[in-house]
Amino acid sequence: MEANSKVVETVLAGLEQADTLEGIQDAIVDLRSHFRVDNMVYHWVDSAGAQYGYGTYPLEWAERYQEQNYLRIDPVVIGCYQRFHPVDWKSLDWSSKAARALQRESLEYGIGNQGYSIPIRGPNGQFALFTVNHTCDDDVWAGFTEQNRRELILVAHYFNQKALEFEPNKAPEQSQPLSPRETDALTLLAIGYNRAQVAETLSISEHTLRVYIESARFKLGAANTTHAVARALTRGVIVV
């Protein structure tokens, strides 16, 4: 389960040129094949609460999910809505009776036992999930997510940016441009560096780093550092 970076770049370049929803679907199917996983799905919830998506889940499961309104009890949606970083499904709360029943039923429809979802936030309250799903043991899955995490985050934001083009009456958020140092700091935080590592990489003190981060947070209108990183990713200010 490893993607060829050149192939991924080619597919994403095609995605940028897509002018129909069918083009987005074709891109997600191609990427599913190149990452060698069972399923890859983009799931959008707009500011009015409506939802749609595209991907490789069985159509029967997608219909069942919407008919039963599983959105309200799905630990993946609930857990990711509370987070900004990618989430392994094993870290979510599946303890409720409803959640366990949902999990059992999804397996019956051919949904894999492993999942990795990337929450994405856009303008006007838009929320989306980009999910990779597969059947394998925990060690294999841990190796896959570690090896492909950065590329999957990039893919997720490409898909969301393209999806925004199809949202009617969208109004992009405006923000002050970040300085090169602010951009570097948020980029390193986004790929998992801690503050000490970021400061060392940029050859600055942690106090100076804090100034850069707070300035970026203010420009992005973010509540905290994690929120600033998420907004910078969503708007394409940084790419990891």
Image (tube, rainbow, N blue to C red):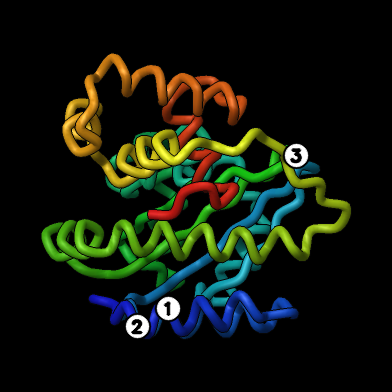
Rounded to the nearest angstrom, the CA distance separating label 1 from label 3 is: 29 Å
Callout 2, which amino acid?
Lys
Rounded to the nearest angstrom, the CA distance separating label 3 from label 2 is: 34 Å
Which residue in the protein does label 1 denote? 9
**Is residue 127 placed above or below 56 in the rendered structure?**
above
**Element carrying mark 3:** helix
Disc number for residue 235:
none
Find the residue positioned furthest to the top.
207
- For the point 71% across and 42% down, the residue is 123
**Element carrying mark 2:** helix
- For the point 46% across and 65% down, the residue is 155
Residue 235: give x, y in percent of width and height: 59, 48
Residue 216: give x, y in percent of width and height: 50, 28
Q: Quadrant of the image for the C terminus?
A: bottom left
Using residue 199 as the reference point, say whether residue 34 is left or right of it.
right
Q: Quadrant of the image for the N terminus?
A: bottom left
Which residue in the protein does label 2 denote? 6
Disc number for residue 124:
3
Crowding at label 3, few (<14), some or many (≥20) Cα neighbours within 10 Å?
Answer: few
- For the point 73% across and 48% down, the residue is 46
Callout 1, which amino acid?
Glu
**Is residue 127 placed above or below 224 in the rendered structure?**
below
Q: Nearer the viewer, residue 65 or 155?
A: 155
Q: Quadrant of residue 221?
A: top right
Mark 1 and 3 residues: CB-CB less than 8 Å, in contact? no
Callout 3, which amino acid?
Asn
Q: Quadrant of residue 64?
A: bottom right
Q: Mark 1 or 3, which is nearer the eye? A: 1
Crowding at label 1, few (<14), some or many (≥20) Cα neighbours within 10 Å?
Answer: few
Mark 1 and 2 residues: CB-CB less than 8 Å, in contact? yes
